[in-house]
Amino acid sequence: MLIVMSAAADESDIQRVCDTIERLGFEARPIPGGQRTAIGVVGNDGPVDAGRFVGLPNVREVISVSAPYKLVSWEWKPTPTIIELPNGTLVGGGGLALMAGPCAVESRDQIFRSAELVAHAGGTVLRGGVFKPRTSPYSFQGLGLDGLRWMREAADAHGLAVVTEAVDPDSARAIADLADIIQIGARNMQNFALLTAVGELRVPVMLKRGMAATIKEWLLAAEYVLRGGNEQVILCERGIRSFDDMTRNVLDIGAIAAARTRTHLPIVADPSHGCGRRDLVAPLARAATAAGADGLIIEMHPDPSEALSDGAQSLYPAQLDALAIQLKRLREAMLD
Amino acid sequence: MLIVMSAAADESDIQRVCDTIERLGFEARPIPGGQRTAIGVVGNDGPVDAGRFVGLPNVREVISVSAPYKLVSWEWKPTPTIIELPNGTLVGGGGLALMAGPCAVESRDQIFRSAELVAHAGGTVLRGGVFKPRTSPYSFQGLGLDGLRWMREAADAHGLAVVTEAVDPDSARAIADLADIIQIGARNMQNFALLTAVGELRVPVMLKRGMAATIKEWLLAAEYVLRGGNEQVILCERGIRSFDDMTRNVLDIGAIAAARTRTHLPIVADPSHGCGRRDLVAPLARAATAAGADGLIIEMHPDPSEALSDGAQSLYPAQLDALAIQLKRLREAMLD
Amino acid sequence: MLIVMSAAADESDIQRVCDTIERLGFEARPIPGGQRTAIGVVGNDGPVDAGRFVGLPNVREVISVSAPYKLVSWEWKPTPTIIELPNGTLVGGGGLALMAGPCAVESRDQIFRSAELVAHAGGTVLRGGVFKPRTSPYSFQGLGLDGLRWMREAADAHGLAVVTEAVDPDSARAIADLADIIQIGARNMQNFALLTAVGELRVPVMLKRGMAATIKEWLLAAEYVLRGGNEQVILCERGIRSFDDMTRNVLDIGAIAAARTRTHLPIVADPSHGCGRRDLVAPLARAATAAGADGLIIEMHPDPSEALSDGAQSLYPAQLDALAIQLKRLREAMLD
Amino acid sequence: MLIVMSAAADESDIQRVCDTIERLGFEARPIPGGQRTAIGVVGNDGPVDAGRFVGLPNVREVISVSAPYKLVSWEWKPTPTIIELPNGTLVGGGGLALMAGPCAVESRDQIFRSAELVAHAGGTVLRGGVFKPRTSPYSFQGLGLDGLRWMREAADAHGLAVVTEAVDPDSARAIADLADIIQIGARNMQNFALLTAVGELRVPVMLKRGMAATIKEWLLAAEYVLRGGNEQVILCERGIRSFDDMTRNVLDIGAIAAARTRTHLPIVADPSHGCGRRDLVAPLARAATAAGADGLIIEMHPDPSEALSDGAQSLYPAQLDALAIQLKRLREAMLD
């Protein structure tokens, strides 16, 4: 950590910072600069709380040199984390896991047809919401546990694993009993009570990036889960908010590659929410694959025009089939 | 609502949209345009779920003409909502409520000194975190219920009301028993389980705007609380995320005035989190007041250089005294 | 176009809007809604200036249904524009044009070595700045015409085409005489005087997207050039500004696919400026290719550690060789 | 400046950085850290080009400790810059300059009526565009020199100064002959050819902040003008781009206060473009004043419903009168 003093700082201000550093058990290293002095903190092998310094007189800024996260980093675990699901699906470590299904489970029939179509396309994980976090209280809120049980049956009938979203600790525990991956949605990425709750479970967690979360905040949210003892975390890039209105979000493909440089956890992409438009899902899915994603989670509906939510971004079954073939080709081209 | 068809849409596509509109019990009004046809939805006095249309073939976009929220709107309640706290503080309706205190309750002594200083400056509500949502699991997480009890005692000793943040339904219920306002933080603005939980309580709720939430999403989050039967909601603008790194956030002063045109709920501003810098708190507090805010929530610490969190943005006691005087003057100048 | 009235609008307000529409020679179609009335504008086959309506009493918003651009759209030209450079390079229409070179021309020797290395990697266009728009007046500003002449010689020696940036009409004309593509940088995307100037030239123009420009604004900027009679425009996505600080910008891969749905112009990507980090250039270049880019413009320096600018994002020669092979494979996998 | 090495850096990497620092004539100060080493650059009293270091092996990041700008800073000139216009208007140094007028000069009559109305409200500077940078080539582009001459006459008839926008060096020189302030628009904030051109003139320049420009980039753009010898620069905050669609931009009130901490130049605000909505102009104008702005530039039209551009954000004459009174009151309240 580095504390940069303002030009107006005098000896006593600098001494006060040095004393504080030493009170914390670290070593202070002043670096006189042309316009101002900076003070390095030496000897900390973990993060230091910047809050102890920013308040001191004539401190201009505090720069964190060491990364604030630990368990998610390559320094902590130098080998890629590979998560194996009960049906044998591997997430991480070189393969490309294909997760697909409707935005929401709407009926027993709809999810059974969806499972069949996902399996037909070569997908191995069935997605579908049963507890829906909706922006408006007047929108469809999901079928709850009944929907989840249907989803489990449908997945088992076709050898698929199940991923669905939890909205609070209770739903997380219910999902842990019936599903294979607990999804934490973008709006809950910093719902620390929920992160702590899933950290105590022993079921894989898919953590979506918040729509205005920095990569560092995303990794720190994952750190909450690992710290609880649950090391099976999958990061999911799903698009960030921007000023453009032609797409719902901007899928931050670069974040997949950037996060990869910092963490051993598997990283997947959600091109459906990443753009909100059916016609852009395939190009973005290909792009995420080419950028090194470990998997994709894609919305597909047996009949998008009848979807109760997100119909505009759901692929038609035949489109999922075609996309799966393209992705397989791309993956092979990259491995050659 | 208006459904805009793509240029490629043919009669059958248009008919399909019209049929869907009528199946929903509304009237369809096609408007042939130069390049493409648009179809108006007539007869809906409440919001219509766009999801039913966006998935139909050759639908280019769906434009919501009516506002998606209802209970929070002026159409629903044409008079400003005024919230009266047990100590007589009024939030909304023309006054300027001053809420202040430390980022976090750190000790019994610290919160008692804080309460005395807030009262001395003319504040009537004591702020302080006891359940802290922190980006890093390694940062100070708050003192919990003990801290809250100390806060209640300190506030009572000086005739102040209490506002503190809830992080989940359990903490919300605990806060409802001991505090006067339950704060929902920016990271939880779309934690719908929490919004639903506080909607069932009968204690005022301060809902902070998410750092990338649109004003519409903010109002819809408030709609969740009102829909639960809790009509005492205070909106709080606390800064949005931007590309600039000179301040922590950008306090969206215009959002205070813009939201005012749409809702009867009181709106306050948090200039401390809005910028993250002590030296900008006063100008931003004055600006929010001049823009018509119903109140301010400001971080003040008896000794910022010793603060365990956010010391950099906490005012010194004397600065709060001086600011309170400036704000009083501004308010009078506006009322003249 | 659709004009949405506020709830307070009365008959006379609505009539005023209808009269204005008819004064402009169009037909007005009122659509009474549950909460408010909307008025459709029928009969315009070109864009209508919203400015004529937004100022009228009780007009809530004006929604443009027809696209505001024309010459760049598929409606105007249903076949992809393919630009052929003097050395035979085709940009658009299915191939992948590889443009590479240093951020800036630094010396005769450096640009000759660069040209040799670009050709060796299979690139066909040499990039390099001679007129540098720099954020700081104290940064290296480029070698000007001398640098451009060296660049031309170096390119000719290896059968390459030349692309370099213009910063004003004079430099644009000078570049038109010596280079094959005139680049308009992101900071000048809405420098309309410059857009108008290059519109009068007959040399291909590469128009970079502004770092906060919507796709619509980007296409309208291109419309300026086409309107001047210069139909050879290449769009270049180079990253948008975001809140994250781990990369310099966020390369908006989705914008490549989204713009493709609206325009016949070729679209290339600049992954180097898109992230600002050498280690992310390859994954982003692959991603842009997989998303359907018609070409890539990449920074490569014979010796990045000696680069006078942007050394951090310049590839080493061997990295460009390796990337070119990966891209060729990806492209083939997509064409199969 | 501080160079932070990656964890993988070895002695030779560190030595290479130190050697480079010393080759540049500075002193290198290594600071070994827990996870990685950082190297301080000592002895530079001006900015150092980070480009020399970022390219070196195992350099993780380069942190600029000293500000990159110089002439605009308080370190360079410790007293506020006050600009006096020919009609006696002072911009900077404690007063509040009121600049108002239509978005565009539309006719001789319209600008004469505007000047009369601005003077009536107590404004002392007449604004109005004659060279209009428009997003669409199909929008009204301005009346050019004729409009400017009418504007000069109208202003003189009422003792007003004139501010209007330049779009290139030629228009800047023409404006320098007839107007009192040359405006550089947000889209041209980094049009360095234009900045250099106005730097050679001796007429005050109003530099609008780009809609995605950091405060640092804004100050560096001003540095271009001062470096040319023109020290009369007025900074103008006019709103930044955000994700919200309820207002056209987000007026960054905090940037007025933040820039004030770094520069001696006067800072004004443009609430009209800052929000794009007439009903928010007054609250934002009051807010900017309360935050310490040295002036305001506001759009007012004799008859907004007839405006050829930006009618939606232009005040009615009576609204400008009322606002001017409010602002006077606020200013007095702040000075008491």
Image: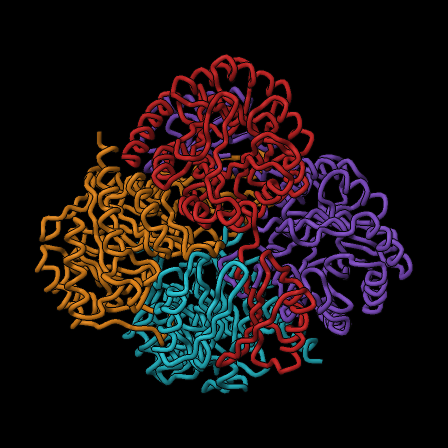
Chain colours: A purple, B red, C cyan, D orange
Residue B271 in the image, given as x and y percentages of width and height? 43, 36
Residue C177 seen: no
Which quadrant would the C terminus of chain B be assigned to in this image?
A: top left
Which quadrant would the N terminus of chain B be assigned to in this image?
A: bottom right
Q: Nearer the viewer, residue A50 or B91?
A: B91
Q: Image quarter for residue C289?
A: bottom right
Q: Is residue B209 left or right of residue C16?
A: right
Residue A316 in the image, given as x and y percentages of width and height? 74, 71
Relative to C4, say whether B82 is above or below: above
Q: Image quarter for residue B270?
A: top left
Which residue: 52% across, 82% down? C74
Q: Nearer the viewer, residue B221 or B324?
A: B221
Q: Is residue A297 left or right of residue C112?
A: right
Residue C181 in the image, given as x and y percentages of width and height? 42, 78
Which residue: 48% across, 34% down? B82
Q: Nearer the viewer, residue A95 or D191?
A: D191
Q: Is residue A330 left or right of residue C101?
A: right
Residue B41 in the image, given as x and y percentages of width and height? 58, 67
